[in-house]
Image (tube, rainbow, N blue to C red):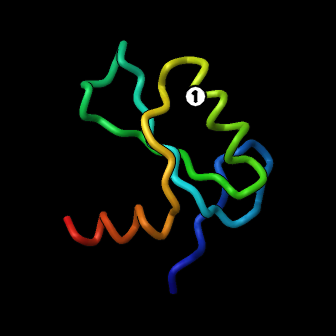
Amino acid sequence: MSETPICSAKGCRADAVWVLAWNNPKIHTPERRKTWIACEEHREHLSQFLGVRGFLKDVVPLREWEDSAADR
């Protein structure tokens, strides 16, 4: 049984629908991608948090991210 991923925002228990791909250039190689997942409500907040720091690389729908991972 597969569980629906839960939003990465602190205290949030909503289903995630977005993937925020990011990396910290001070410690990660350029091609490395870490991920946070977000519900609709927290997508913008988490994107801004990463964006201000220069970490945000991409925001894609969770389903699209999962489909592209299955193709690899």
Residue at image coords 35%, 71%: 67
Q: Position of residue 28 (x, y in %)?
A: 31, 24
Farthest residue in the bottom direction? Answer: 1
Q: Is residue 54 above or below residue 72?
A: above
**How many badges with numbers are in the image?**
1
Horizontally, residue 13 falls left or right of residue 1, namely right
Report whether 36 appears left or right of 69: right
Q: Quadrant of residue 15?
A: bottom right
Identify the element where label 1 is drawn.
helix
Instruction: Give amino acid for label 1.
Output: Leu
Task: Point out the residue furthest to the left here.
Answer: 72
**Quick one: 2 or 14, which is closer to the camera?**
14
Q: To which quarter of the image does residue 17 belong?
A: bottom right
Residue bearing mark 1: 50
- Return the x and y of residue 2 as percentages of the image width and height: 51, 80
Tell me what residue is drawn at x 60 percent, y 73 percent.
4
Q: In the picture shown, does residue 11 fall above or below 54?
A: below
Question: Furthest residue to the top?
Answer: 26
Residue 11 pos. (x, y %): 80, 48
Residue at image position (22%, 70%) is: 71
Question: Where is residue 66 drawn, in percent x and y?
Answer: 40, 67
Please tell me which residue is depicted at 73% across the width and 37% down the height of the picture. Answer: 45
Quarter holding the C terminus is: bottom left
